[in-house]
Image (tube, coloured by chain):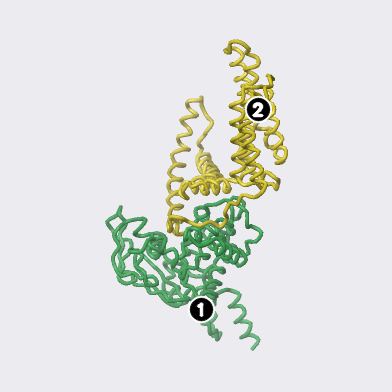
Amino acid sequence: MEGVNYTYPSSEEPVLRNIDLRIGRGEYILLAGPSGCGKSTLARILNGLIPNFYGGKLEGKILVDGKDPRKTPTYEMALTVGFVFQNPENQLFFSDVEREIAFGLENLGLPPHEIRRKVEDAIRKYGLENLRHRSPAELSGGQKQKVAIASVMVMEPKLLVLDEPTANLDPISAVKVLGLVKREVLERRISAIVIEHRVELVLPYVDRVVVMDRGRIVGDGEPYSVIQENSGLIGRPAIFDVYARLRAKGFPLHRWPRTPEQLAEDLKRILQG
Amino acid sequence: MSSPLQAFKYVPKDTFMDRLDPRSKFALSLSLLAASLASPQLTMQLVYLALATLLIAAAKRLAQWTPTLKAISPLVAAIFAANLIFTPGMPLTYATLMALRFFTVTTSFTLFFLTTTPDDLSLALEEMGVPREYTLMFTMSLRFVPTLADDVETVTAALLSRGFQLDRGNIIQRAKNYVYLLVPLIIYEVRRSLMIAEALEARAFGATKKPTRLYTLKMKKPDYLVLIASALIAVSPLAPAILNLSII
């Protein structure tokens, strides 16, 4: 994205101002910022929901895998950009997990045997064997979101966008869901952007953090420094403070901690000499 | 779910009826319905009703069927009474016929809905040439029933927790109270439907005019037998006349 501005049809003020963003293959990015800063809007531009579904005025240069989402129908963008929404309830349309996963492939007109093969792969990969014929009402929040991710990933997109995928989940399910994304990033070399408010949940996985505020990108880069510089906007994991204090006391810690466990591990190594 | 609607709630079981193709099941239910409507004879009505009941028993759904039976009984009684009073000639025979007929019609359709999943039903519709947009509408409307029930609960709880009494006052007042439930609920559901539309777009809905399907329906040997049986049932009202039997 280069110099992207966007204004919703019902508003005068632009919600995105001069956005420059380049996403590389295999990157796992946290997109953070206060509510209403334009994160979800930015995410929806990537798969063309904006402006194709929402309308409004979108300016600037946008290319996703060589395609301009403005000139490409959303269903075609769906092949390149997978989108997982906040509420899993609204993205499950069938009373059967198998049919749910097959739906996107059916829409693309794939032959039934190929759909069967891909659905079986996805079911195995996401450990859904026992839930195969369950309806969403019989699934937990974490299981629903897992099915939602599986049914998007089965279409093999190159970029996965997750808009607060863990907002309705308990912390343990949330970590599991974010871990699933990490696995896809590592195994298939896809890129992923996750919008998330609980920074410490994503921290173990992401290798880049983008911070937005009032429609602009105000921070972009390596997680530790970006989070430190923007902690007023997105908060800071308590473990960062512990790390800073330990360093101030002269502990030779060479890497910033992604998890408390990691810091404990490093500290143990130092203390044991 | 309240008892009369029990008839339309699919509970998975693995019986002969469940394994049939939804299209042949539909033909079977339809032929029972047509035969029952066409036949003016009491004996034949009893045969149809017995047949439909037997099929429900074969599908191991008798326990689910009885609440429906109970629920429609007052209606059947009313049909019987009305015909008894207003029919000239032989009112008792005619009234019994009409009452039996009503039982047969409901039973034959209960048979279909008790043994067919909503997903199978929409597959069958798609197979018959109904576009995906419409079958999906049907599948989704059933899929979102529990979600809607949750939403009603959420809005009700929000109203109650702010001291609102839904069940206060006379009937008119109560009806008015429900407006307070309906307005937020409608807004809630309109927003939900927009989010669902977004999610549909993101799953390439509408990419091809002719989407393929993971499952395709296939008629097997038992299905053809059922189709033949259905055809026989459909013409059975003519049987007494052909055989020149003068049973009532």
Mark 1, secondary structure of its residue: helix
Q: Chain of mark 1?
A: A
Splitting the image into 4 quarters, where does residue B243 fall? Answer: top right
SS of the residue under disc 2:
helix
In the rendered view of the protein, which quadrant contains the C terminus of chain A?
bottom right
Q: Which residue is mark 2?
A: B239
Q: Residue at x 29, y 68 (%)?
A: A60
Q: Is residue A24 found left or right of A243 in the rendered image?
A: left
**In the rendered view, would you say B36 is above or below A190?**
above
Observer-nearest of B239 and B220: B239
Count residues near mark 1 (Cα–Cα under 10 Å), then give few for <14, some for 14-19, many for 20+: some
Q: Is residue B59 visible?
A: yes
Q: Which colour represents chain B?
A: yellow
Q: CA distance from mark 1 to mark 2?
A: 94 Å
Q: Amino acid at mark 2?
A: Ala
Residue shown at 55% from the left, 56% from the top: A100
Q: Which chain is green?
A: A
Where in the figure is residue A82, as x and y percent of width and height? 47, 64
Whether residue A223 is visible to the viewer of this picture, yes or no, is no
Q: Would you name the residue on which mark 1 appears?
A: A244
**Vertical side of B158 occupied by A17: above or below:** below
The residue positioned farthest toward the bottom in the image shown = A273
Q: Is residue A9 left or right of residue B61?
A: left
Pick out the residue farthest to the top: B89
Residue name at image x 41 percent, y 74 percent: A23
Q: In the rendered view, tell whether residue A245 sits above or below residue B115.
A: below
Amino acid type for the residue under numbered disc 1: Ala
**B11 vs B240, nearest the viewer:** B240
Q: Residue A246: x percent and y percent?
A: 55, 80
User: In this rendering, do the residues under marks 1 and 2 share a single chain?
Assistant: no
- The answer to which quarter of the image holds residue A262 is bottom right
